[in-house]
Image (cartoon, rainbow, N blue to C red):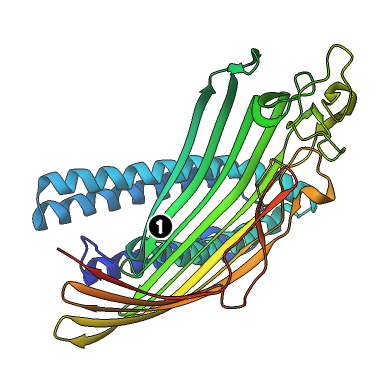
Amino acid sequence: METIGSWELWAGFSAIVLVMLAIDLFVVGGGKEHRVSFKEAAVWSVIWISLTLAFAGGLWWYLDGSVGREVANSKALEFITGYLIEKALAVDNVFIWLMLFSFFAVPVELQKRVLLYGVLGAIIMRTIMIFAGVWLIAQFHWLLYVFAARGYKPGGLNPPGATFAKETVWDFEFGWKSSFLDKHIRTQIGAFYNRYNNFQIDAINPVSGTNAVINVPGTSTIKGLEAQLQAKFGGLSFSAAGAYVDSKLSTVQIVNRWIPGATASLPLCTGGAVFPACFNYPAAGMTGGGGPNLLSPKWTWNASLSYKFNLGQDATIEPRINYSNVSSQQAYLTYAPQDLIGGHSLASANIAIEYQNYNLDFYANNLTKEYYVTGISGTNNFFGSPREFGVRLGVKF
């Protein structure tokens, strides 16, 4: 902790505080419990304020002779400013004391003792918090941010000539970034709230029967939390990240694509034509939406751990393990069981070897041989990669 005062100054300050406390405890009013009159309170208030101003003058005189006039003026002003702020807050607290004394029916002659207990506790707790705060500020580097933005996505045309409206959004974010332990650990935590009007999304248009961009009328919201952690101590590295997303779309008219033929691959029935040559899409219309945004899992998180060994001669070897998890998500606005993409977890590992400008990477993905779906298009599922083993060789030029 940096300070402009010497140990003698700190010792003198502590001694003054202890002496004043002793006077207040054992001298004022003869050290007996009694009803404090307005005159007695006013006299002692003048005495304490005078002692404070005298201490400020002594502080200025000490600093003027030890570090110069500019620092003396600045620090004395800071002390007086802090004192006035605390005095104003203390006056504000008087109303709280009166409410508590009235509620608990504390006798007037005992109110001073109760106040002294409270003041002593406040002094002790504030001393602890001040020194703890100074230590935390010295150890941590942090940034608090608040962000708000207005977004806009233009409307457009869908074949065969239908239009969709513009989308607007208000984006609000609040977060905290920090690093501590000499920047060996970095953290980031953020919260966000997005409020959409006329949210644009892909679906089968119940009027034309084509895959098109449609507007979800009204207000849709997406909100959540994100967190990241990075730690590095020597060759050891650890990172983790996670997110929680809660989204809610308004309802919208769509085509139930799980009705046989309602896949947008058949033309709209006109002029007396019937299925299977065409399809009557308006008859297959339904109210969709009203739930989470598509392809938006509620929970995602990942973590990795590695250690880099220095082999000398510009050579290193670094084994790493990774693990990730994604919760279930919806693929279409019907929210049918067939539209649900199940959650999955993946584990992978690799060993990276570097020597001067060359690097060799042995990797293994999907170690647990997870069988999982990454997307749905119509009635077709797209599956993730199976278990893989491989080697990559690279050269830096």
Where, quadrant-wise, is the C terminus in this rendering? bottom left
Tell me the element at label 1.
strand
Task: Please tell me which residue is depicted at 27% across the width and 49% down the height of the picture.
Answer: 56
Choose between 76 and 179: the one closer to the eye: 179
Q: Mark yes or no: residue 34 visible.
A: no
> Which quadrant holds residue 112?
bottom right
Q: Amino acid at mark 1?
A: Ser
Q: How many numbered markers are drawn? A: 1
Q: Nearer the viewer, residue 148 or 12?
A: 148
Q: Is residue 377 visible?
A: yes
* In the rendered image, the vertical position of residue 282 relative to residue 360, given as above or below: above
Where residue 209 sits: x, y (%)? 76, 24
Q: Position of residue 88 (x, y in %)?
A: 49, 39
Q: Can you say whether 363 is above or below 183 in the image?
A: below
Q: Where does label 1 land, which residue?
A: 178
Q: Is residue 380 left or right of residue 176?
A: right
Pinpoint residue 310: horizontal percent, then vertical percent. 24, 85
Q: Name the residue nearer the viewer: 363 or 183.
A: 363
Indicate the quadrant where residue 268 lies.
top right
What residue lies at 16% left-to-right and 52% top-to-bottom? 61
x%, y% of residue 94?
61, 43
The residue located at (11%, 55%) in the rendering is 67
Asked whether, in this view, residue 221 is left or right of residue 171, the answer is right
Q: Residue visible at 47% across and 51% down?
A: 176
Q: Quadrant of the N terminus?
A: bottom left
Q: Residues within 10 Å of mark 1 (few under 14, many from 20)?
A: some
Where residue 122 sits, quadrant-wise, is bottom right
